[in-house]
Amino acid sequence: MKRLWYFIHKELLLLGRDLHGLLLLFVMPAVFILIMTFALQNQYADEGQVKIDYFLLDQDDSPLSRELIESLAQIDNLHRLSTAMNEQALRAATAEDDSKFLMIINKNFEQQLLAGKSALRLEIAPGTKPVMVHLVNAQLQNILGQLSLKIQLQALLAMGDPGAVETLTQVDGKALVTVQSLYKGSSADKDSQERPSSVQQNVPGWLLFSMFFIAIPLSNTLISERSQGTLARLQSMNFPYYTILLGKLIPYFLINLLQVVGMLLIGVYLVPMLGGERLNLGNSFAGLAVISLSASFAAVAYALFIAQLARTTEQATILSGVCNIIMAALGGVMVPRFVMPPVMQDLSVFSPMAWGLDGFLDILLRNGGVNAVLHEAAALSIFGLGLLLLSAFLFSRPGKH
Amino acid sequence: MIKIRQLQFTYQGADQPALANINLCVKSKSIFGLLGPNGAGKTTLLSMLSGLLPRPARSIFIDDCDLSSGNNPCNSGLSLVPQDYAFYQNLTVKENLNFFAGVQGMAKPVLKTRLGEVSEITGLQQRLNQKATTLSGGLKRRLNLAIGLLNSPKLLLLDEPTVGIDPHSRHFILEAIREINRQGTTIIYTSHYMEEVEALCDEIAVLDKGQVVVEGSLQALLQAQGKRSLCVDLIDLPEAQQLEALGKMPGLTHNSLRLDIPVSSEVEILKALETLQEQELGIGRIHYGAHNLEELFLDITQRTLRD
């Protein structure tokens, strides 16, 4: 353990004196985040005149529920998808993003409405922008409020007592609609819906890009050690290979985590200070930690692997640079995945950056928790473990150095 | 005593073995010179001794301790000083020494003491806070050596430790090596500077094409290989008339400016010198008796140009 500390200390001293490495790891992603966030801000924010698809299931099938359906049909930006599916199938289709919303009119609709209780459930497809949820929810509350007033008024008029009109009560629209996201672990029904912005896409995207760029300084130090005979000298000192490998892995792992903290802070504080949207860190720091740790592990293992493949620092720089750009382009860092055609979206599963980005978006955009990022974290960890074992094998080959 | 028995090694994909059936004995506390042209197998042998290349069982022993077994304590008494500047250019001298001592598991008080000792032996006391990249070539060589001394090795493997430095630095390093040897460290020394080996080493071995061509006491080898002939280097090429007169000396060979005159006694030496004087030949240098190491080395390795 004491020996390992000397390796870590040495690596941090070297990196601290490597101006180019520091610029690459900290300044480059910060600049990218700022430029891309502001350059694409309007693109992400502009909702335009889009039609929002929804499924509707009428479990009450009464004149009042049909009146609600009619009112919904009058709204320009809502588009009902006609279907004969049952509730379960509709929910599954919505979860698959066939439609953005599933509206279910509850049984005893009128009684619920009069009692000011939940008369309608609004279920949301995963990844639906919170601004859209807010818009639809507000329209539903408005219609339900009007319907509630109307049936109260009709009841009073039927009683023939005009003075009783003063007893009419404005119902709380929020209580009439139960909002539920079909995204596991999401809390899309919260009042604090953040408007999705380019900062949510660009901060994690360029953060991941820079995390994988750790391959350049890491491989450069390892290749220099190899070519200058330092590695041979260390190996002749009769201690296990894994100490040397861990001595590289741990300090760069810590650097990666520093990048995460630094770039998230830029999104939270610097971007709004310069007039952009503030990054919402979501509700799960544990989830954020899990995805950050696994992305960092994958990036460091990838860097070690590049260092084993390349013979010269030039080769390492070109190889890692090209691989990083391809992974970023494919993984939705440079071009967001949601604007890609389906074929490209399918291809993006081959990029570890896409796994990391999905994980970060689970937390930052969809308000997921630890469970929401587990499969992305597992994919990144398996990727990292595989490359780490390969690197350890290549590193320990006799006569390699 | 270091014993090497029937040591063989072939690099993956190579047609010829890099080392073939090497047998050597190195006396404890001696300085042993390992010579050979480029590609002879010197670095491969040092790599196997230091454990960088796998060591077959029962092939290398230090004081009857087989080095092939993994966690052999004898390994900790061994240190390699590579030919390259095997340290971190962006760290200071002290940071480098601290790191290499620390990773060898040295406790802090021992580390501090040893750091003082090795910087004194190598004359680096005034340079401890200087970045390695700003050191001169000679100081870099001294730092390279200092790192190799940190673990107080019983066996020190020096791979061309003075290559590319000025005579003053070389003299300093050679003196430091003598001092380290006086303190009881056995040294295996490779160099292409024959005068260094001649001045330092008690015994030598010459490797060529992965085999030991000659091994033994340096003085004995120089005496044994020395020719009983007078070697004369001329200033000007002899004319035909002069050559004809010289040709009367039995066994004389002539190669450009060099004459090689076989002689078996002091009388014959004087006679040969008289003949040279009669012919009024301009003489640059005359040599008789034991070879110097360079001559011996070139004779043994047959003077052919290597890779």
Image: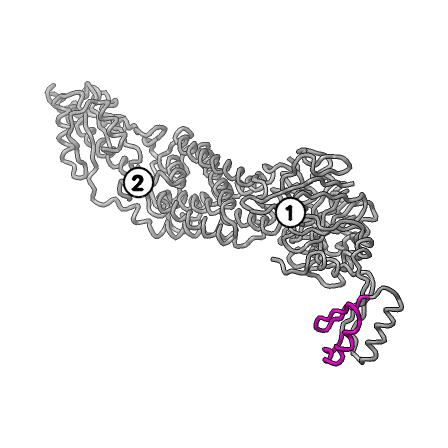
Percent across and percent down for residue A123 are 26, 28
Q: Amino acid at mark 1?
A: Thr
Residue B22 vs residue B67, the one in the foreground: B22
**Position of B230 relative to B218 (above/below):** below
- Secondary structure found at label 2: helix
**Quadrant location of residue A122?**
top left
Dot 2 corresponds to which residue?
Answer: A345
The reply, left or right, for residue A159 in relation to residue B227 is: left
Chain on which label 1 sits: B
**Can you say whether A7 is above or below B218 in the image?**
above
Which quarter of the picture shows residue A168? top left
Q: Amino acid at mark 2?
A: Gln
In the rendered image, the residue lying farthest to the right is B267
Q: Quadrant of the N terminus of chain B?
A: top right
**Which labelled disc corresponds to residue B44?**
1
Q: Nearer the viewer, residue B168 or A366?
A: B168
- Against B179, residue A6 (above or below) is above
Bounds of the magenta span?
B234-262
Label 1 and label 2: CA atoms lie apart by 53 Å
Is residue A209 highlighted in magenta? no
Q: Position of residue B297 (x, y in %)?
A: 73, 57
SS assignment at label 1: helix
Which-is-in-front pick, marks 1 and 2? 1
Labelled disc at residue B126: none
The quarter of the picture where the C terminus of chain B appears is bottom right
B202 vs A361, left or right, is right
Counting from the top left corner in percent of width and height, residue A317 is at 48, 52
How many other residues sit within 10 Å of disc 2, few (<14), some (14-19) or many (≥20)?
some
Q: Left or right: B269 with respect to A77? A: right
Task: Give the chain of mark 2.
Answer: A
Graded by Cα atoms within 10 Å as few (under 14), some (14 to 19) or many (20 or more), the crowding at tag 1 reads many
